[in-house]
Amino acid sequence: MMTRQKKEILKKIADIEEWIAADEEMGCGFAPASFYDLLYEEIHKLEEQLAKLMHYDSVLEMYHDNRWMKGQQDAEKMIFI
């Protein structure tokens, strides 16, 4: 079951990833090498929060659980509909 807090975290992660992708597309690769580091750190912090909410010990454990992958796909469908 996906709680509201989990959905909000997934939405924030998706928003950041979309912003990075759009900026890379529009910038044609002219951003400095470390330009997105702060954004990737924010994504990692959000993933850590999500892992804790889902009762995992780490983000890595969450991503290696087959149940998470199915839940992630379902959540992405809900976010982008």
Image (tube, rainbow, N blue to C red):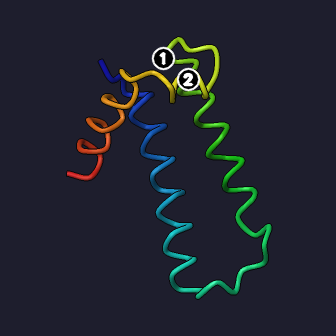
Q: Which residue is mark 2?
A: 51
Residue under the point 67% across and 37% down: 45
As drawn, the residue found furthest toward the left would be 81
Determine crowd level at label 1: few under 14, some 14-19, many 20+ residues with C-alpha closer than 10 A: some
User: In this image, 20 relative to 79: left or right?
Assistant: right
Of the 4 image quadrants, the one containing the N terminus is top left
| SS at mark 1 in the image | loop
Residue under the point 45% across and 21% down: 65
Q: Which residue is mark 1?
A: 54
CA distance for labels 2 and 1: 5 Å
Where in the figure is residue 38, as x and y percent of width and height? Answer: 74, 56
Where in the figure is residue 39, as x and y percent of width and height? Answer: 67, 56
**In the image, is residue 51 above or below residue 41?**
above
Residue 66: which quarter of the image?
A: top left
Determine crowd level at label 2: few under 14, some 14-19, many 20+ residues with C-alpha closer than 10 A: many
Of residue 65 and residue 29, the one placed in the foreground of this image is 65
Residue 70: which quarter of the image?
A: top left
